[in-house]
Image (cartoon, rainbow, N blue to C red):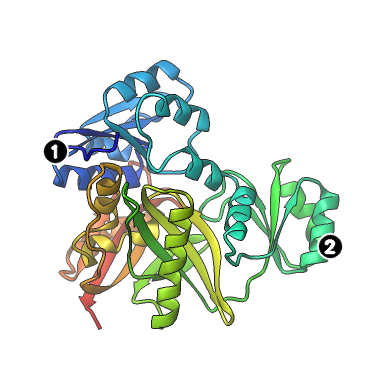
Amino acid sequence: MTEALHPGATIGILGGGQLGRMLSIAAARLGLRCHVYDPLANPPAGDVAHAVTTAGYDDTEALRLFADSVDVVTFEFENIPLEAVAVLEALRPVRPGARALEMSQDRLTEKDFLAGLGLATAPYRAVDTLEELEAALAEIGTPAILKTRRMGYDGKGQVRIMAPEEAPQAFAALAGAPGLLEGFVAFEREVSVIAARALDGSVTCYDPGENVHRDGILHTTTLPASLGRGRGTDAVLLAGRILNALDYVGVMGVELFVTASGLVVNEIAPRVHNSGHWTIEACVIDQFAQHIRAVAGWPLGDGSRHSDAVMTNLIGDEAGDWARYAADPATGLHLYGKAEARPGRKMGHVTRISPRR
């Protein structure tokens, strides 16, 4: 399918979390419907989506019925079994597609892909045994971070190693999962670029945002980032290279370390991204509308920013302070409709905007 979807068409979304929720809201503004597929009952996106299927990703019949009810399929997180995507791709277009999903699910595959494009990454080595970890530490040095190759996010599946003698304890923490050792990058700050690519190959990028993490979870994203025009342009061009190399369709988050010698790619996420939430208040076309436009075959919108912004995640009990945020006329409040606040769980976010400098 290469023609643009008409209003009234249905976009299938794999995953029903807060990103699926905000995608469904964006689609509704454009006259498009969303059908969410999620293994869990009553997902946050279910409050606003046109339809919800509750079934496992291994339920082939449910996947086929889901495909029959939609015109195109996308996803809101990257840890979807590739077998489920293969079932859907045989029936409907899946955008961004299995290649980007497969590459992002394995940190080693992702690092190899980025290095193959000539992009700088942290030094890394695959680690499957304690002996391999010790050899990698001898080569890369400490401090370093040992990560699981798969299923890690928001600081999960990671162990920091400050000295070689910590190797046995760190390796045991992986509980037998394949690992990747990454060397320490002496960075000045972390930024991210939210980039979009359309069916026709056109690319639009938002201004880089400057990120601050707390306990491994994104805390704030600030616009503009302290980059300078040259580095900002480099970051945008770098993101475009990645999207084009993957023949990507949709929005991607590209996380970068800013170092004294240049930009180092930390990781990429083939979906709308937490560090792009500021676009809802500070841009006419936010990242969610941009993603819907791309997967629906529409032209991309203007990604320029009309305001400066600071987005702050509300983690766990922080969302209980919603009344204070709601009383602030300069702050946009977003609550995700999750029933239970748990430590480390993203419950919402707030964005404060100010005139663009």
Residue at x 77% of width, y 68% of height = 141
Residue assigned mark 1: 7
Label 1 vs 2, first from the N-terminus: 1
- The answer to which quarter of the image holds residue 315 is bottom left
- The answer to which quarter of the image holds residue 106 is top right
Q: CA distance from mark 1 to mark 2?
A: 60 Å
- Check disc 1: other Cα within 10 Å, few if <14, some if 14-19, many if 20+: few
Measured as percent of width and height from the top left, residue 230 is found at 42, 81
Residue assigned mark 2: 165
Residue 300 horizontal side relative to residue 106, left or right:
left
Work out whether 150 lies above or below 119: above
Work out whether 337 lies above or below 81: below
Residue at x 45% of width, y 31% of height = 85
Pick the front one: 84 or 112: 112
- Check disc 2: other Cα within 10 Å, few if <14, some if 14-19, many if 20+: few
Q: Find numbered disc 1 in the image and state the secondary structure of the residue it sits on.
A: loop
Residue 66 horizontal side relative to residue 8, left or right:
right
How many labels sit on residues?
Answer: 2
Q: Quarter holding the N terminus? A: top left
Residue at x 28% of width, y 38% of height = 2
Work out whether 165 lies above or below 30: below
**Residue 209 visible in the snapshot:** yes
Residue 324 horizontal side relative to residue 203, left or right:
left
Residue at x 22% of width, y 74% of height = 307
Q: Quarter holding the C terminus? A: bottom left
Label 1 sits on what residue type? Answer: Pro
